[in-house]
Image (cartoon, helix red, strand yellow):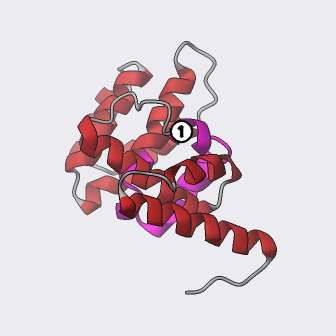
Amino acid sequence: MFVCRKLGLLGQLFEHLRRLPPTLQVAALRDGMAIATDTEREPLAFALIEHAAAEGAGPGANAVTNEALGVLAEHWASLPPAVRAVAAAAGRSKWGPALDPSRPAATASGQSGRAARRMGAARVFESTADPSLAPVAAALCADEDRRIARTAERALLMAAERAAGIPGQA
């Protein structure tokens, strides 16, 4: 993991993390993101991006990628813009399967975790207009949480404006 360099104690923790199977690495990173400070969140997010971008062929590779993208989506609003840009590129065409609301999240805990993941899906689509997320955003327009539904509706409108070449409103 490239994030290990020059991180002191956090870097040492990353070195230990590398010894775990990928599913446990992502689970540990998910737990870390939940309690991380702004300073700690960036290297944790980059470690998740590495998992999201990996083209693994082993058992559970898709599950690891999907869960890494799910965790990134849950924390999308708290990620710096540069990190979001890298995450968007790493997840290109993978976001939809990872954030499909009909597929239960592997580790999103309770109702609040599922709601965070659904809101994250709407926010990721709003930011990226990744076509793989269009069906997810459409489904989220009927979400029981009106904040999520409104965010998904706005994201779909913005994607349609982009596709039609209409300049967005700032």
- The three-letter amino acid code for the residue at tag 1 is Asp
Question: In this picture, is 82 found above or below 86?
Answer: below
Residue at the limit of the structure toward the right, as seen here: 164
Answer with the quarter of the image where residue 17 lies: top left
**Which residue appears at 47% of the width and 68% of the height?**
81
**Which residue appears at 49% of the width and 30% of the height?**
103
Q: How many marks?
A: 1
In screen coordinates, is 132 left or right of 8? right
Q: Which residues are magenta?
A: 72-100
Of residues 57 and 158, the one drawn nearer to the viewer in this rendering: 158
Of residues 109 and 52, the one drawn nearer to the viewer in this rendering: 109
In screen coordinates, is 141 left or right of 42? right
Q: Which residue is mark 1?
A: 100
Residue at the limit of the structure toward the top, as seen here: 59
Answer with the quarter of the image where residue 24 lies: top left
Q: For mark 1, give the secondary structure.
A: loop
Residue 36 belongs to magenta span: no
Q: Position of residue 71 (x, y in %)?
A: 39, 43
Q: Position of residue 97 (x, y in %)?
A: 59, 36
Q: Position of residue 129 (x, y in %)?
A: 64, 61
* Quadrant in the picture for the C terminus: bottom right
Residue 79 belongs to magenta span: yes
* Quadrant in the picture for the N terminus: top left
**Which residue appears at 50% of the width and 25% of the height?**
63
Residue 3 visible in the displayed image: no
Disc 1 crowd, CA 10 A, few/some/many (<14, 14-19, 20+): many
Q: Position of residue 43 (x, y in %)?
A: 37, 51
Question: In this picture, is 166 found above or below 80?
Answer: below
Residue 69 visible in the displayed image: yes
**Which residue appears at 51% of the width and 41% of the height?**
99
In screen coordinates, is 43 left or right of 155? left
Question: In this picture, is 117 found above or below 38?
Answer: above
